[in-house]
Amino acid sequence: MSAAEETGIIIIGGGIAGAGAAFEVSRNSKVVLLERESHCGYHTTGRSAASFTENYGNGVIRRIVLASRSFLTEPPAGFCDYPLLSKRGMITVARADQLDLLREDMEAAQALVPSIVAMTSAEAIARVPVLRADYLAGAYIEPHSMDIDVNGLHQGYLRGARARGARIVTNAGVKAIGRQGGQWRVETPAGTFIAPTLVNAAGAWGDEIAVMAGVRPIGLQPKRRTAFNIPAPAGVDISDWPLVNDVGAEFYFKPDAGQLFVSPADATPSAPMDAYAEDIDVAIGAERLERATTIEVQRVSRSWAGLRTFVADGSPVVGPDDALPDFVWLVGQGGYGIKTSPALSRVCASLIAGKGFPDDVARQGVSMDDLAPHRLRGVESRARQVAS
Ligand SMILES: Cc1cc2nc3c(=O)[nH]c(=O)nc-3n(C[C@H](O)[C@H](O)[C@H](O)COP(=O)(O)OP(=O)(O)OC[C@H]3O[C@@H](n4cnc5c(N)ncnc54)[C@H](O)[C@@H]3O)c2cc1C
């Protein structure tokens, strides 16, 4: 048996969360990132809609997105070969029976994103000519919503982490977590690793990792979301279309490398697993698209699903566990983990380095209490924190 490898920080999970954390944490510490699959990004990170909108998710999410924007618009020198964000825009549409919801939604959105403005149905149809005039009753546009180069961002994090000495170990599914000499001992088929601090960035499997480590789980709930590609309507240049989002969260679609990306915006509770698209969810998405547009779905070129993982309040969970502070949570990013990764990675690294909550994230109105795991523990554990 080969000797255990000692390091400063072990990160479990090579999705965008673990990769971002490795990038930031490796500034100050020796890092080993452990990924179960043969390549990083195989699960939810490789299955997203690649959208950067400041107008989606609860208030905490939206503020974290604002705190992430500057990294994505001006990444560090040498981080990537191409811009991480590209122009897209996002139109939120409503039927007649959704107009009250549209008004409320737009007013709430404008509070954080003042560039959002109402559009007439005719203006929306001028931007996306397949929208049906007899479906659409109102719309608003977020002009600065962007597409994210998810692969560019993910690989940039991993490359940057490696350049700072981090080791990215694939085919390294964590099988057991124990204690040795006051440190974490993590066993995988690729070797055994020992470190004083463990970061749990295992996405849908986050609570399973906690249980392995003897830490109380926080109630993570993975939810399946389906997506599929269909060919673009014949003879139509769709490249400039914005993302079109139903205000009632029944569907969204956007251009995707010459095809259309469509999702029924489903959120079906699931166990942690290698998620796949159910035919019924693809059919529901196609039916909703056909109701709102003149598109007839004749062929689905590819379908897939990924798990968006939430805790009860819909905000991410970042920071040391309340009972075992050398176990650091970085989970619960829901449907927002790509666009929030710059700020959440920095929060995670700053807390590990003992530097407190980053000022720029606090200036956006997010506090440690919005993200810390103790908020999910109930009164009992909060009382223990105050007492200690
Ligand atoms: C259809 C869809 C659309 C989305 N659209 C957007 C969007 O437009 N914008 C946005 O910001 N977000 C979007 N999201 C959400 C985003 O993709 C996720 O929030 C993000 O990818 C979560 O990243 P993660 O690293 O936490 O999880 P993952 O990418 O799932 O990574 C977790 C990793 O942990 C590894 N792991 C688990 N257990 C172990 C173990 N025991 N040992 C070792 N490794 C382990 C897994 O193999 C996995 O690679 C979307 C998601 C879906 C499904």
Image (cartoon, grey):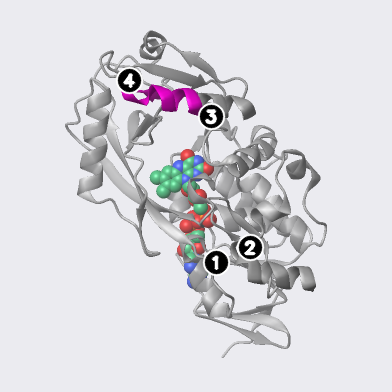
Considering only order in the chain, which callout, 1 or 4, is on the residue closer to the N terminus? 4
Disc 2 on helix, strand or loop?
A: helix
Q: Amino acid at mark 1?
A: Ile
Q: Amino acid at mark 4?
A: Ala
Marks 2,4: beta carbons within 8 A: no
Say which residue label 3 marks.
146
Left or right, residue 263 beside residue 216: left
- Mark 3 and mark 4: Cα distance apart in space: 28 Å
Say which residue label 2 marks.
373
Q: Position of residue 286 (x, y in %)?
A: 23, 35
Say which residue label 1 marks.
218
Q: Position of residue 339 (x, y in %)?
A: 57, 41
Res 69 visible: yes
Question: What is the magenta range?
Answer: 92-105
Res 187 visible: no
Considering only order in the chain, which callout, 3 or 1, is on the residue closer to the N terminus? 3
Marks 1,2: beta carbons within 8 A: yes
